[in-house]
Amino acid sequence: MKKKLTIALVAHDRRKADMIDWVKVHAPCLSQHRLVCTGTTGRLVAQAFADAGIDADVECMNSGPMGGDAEIAAMVVRNEIDLAVFLIDDLNAQPHEADIQMLLRQCRLHNVPIACNRISADLMISSSLWDDPSYKPIEQSYIRFDRK
Ligand SMILES: O=C(CO)COP(=O)(O)O
């Protein structure tokens, strides 16, 4: 990929092993982009790059429960995020569910691609559309639907 993206990486505790494995699989590609992460995810991601001897631009926000999701949601609102990978623990309740829903909603609202499982993340990171100048994302439509 030629374009340098800002990619948000967020994983709940029971999804972190999957996130680190995904990062290792895509390390050569991900190291070409700016990575913005919630606190603990970011520290693990940075460690994975260091262990592999690969230089990477990894920025850590607060930990998720302390507002990291909210900080990344604010970046989404400011159009500072191109792609988000958010591996959610769908089997256990989180104390900051409101922030999680806010990040998901802001990505949907602002048309930011967000992958919540690895196959989506694989497909999104490998899309040739990133470098296609003729591809223009279509904005969301919220036109009222009138039943006849
Ligand atoms: O809780 C999270 C996302 O909702 C992730 O936060 P950490 O990366 O700080 O564990």
Image (tube, rainbow, N blue to C red):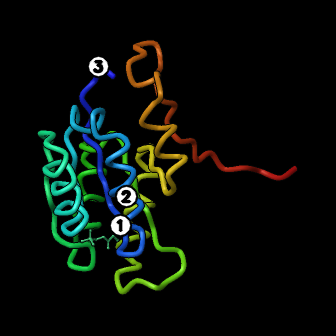
Residue 16 numbered mark, or none = 1
Left or right: residue 147 compared with residue 129: right
Q: Position of residue 103 (x, y in %)?
A: 37, 62
Q: Position of residue 119 (x, y in %)?
A: 55, 47
Seen at 77% across and 50% down, the residue is 146
What residue sits right under mark 3 in the picture?
2
Of the numbered discs 1 and 3, the one sitting upstream in the chain is 3
Q: Position of residue 139 (x, y in %)?
A: 49, 36
For the residue pair 99 and 91, the one nearer the viewer reads as: 91
Left or right: residue 115 compared with residue 74: right
Label 1 within 8 A of ligand 1 by Cβ: yes
Of the numbered discs 2 and 3, the one sitting upstream in the chain is 3
Residue 19 numbered mark, or none = 2
Say what amino acid the circle numbered 2 marks: Met
Residue 99, placed above or below residue 76: below
| Element class at badge 2 | helix
Bin the neighbour count of mark 1 within 10 Å (Cα to Cα): few under 14, some 14-19, many 20 and up: some
Seen at 22% across and 46% down, the residue is 35
Q: CA distance from mark 1 to mark 3?
A: 28 Å
Within the image, what quadrant is residue 112 found in?
top left
Say what amino acid the circle numbered 1 marks: Lys
Within the image, what quadrant is residue 27 found in?
top left
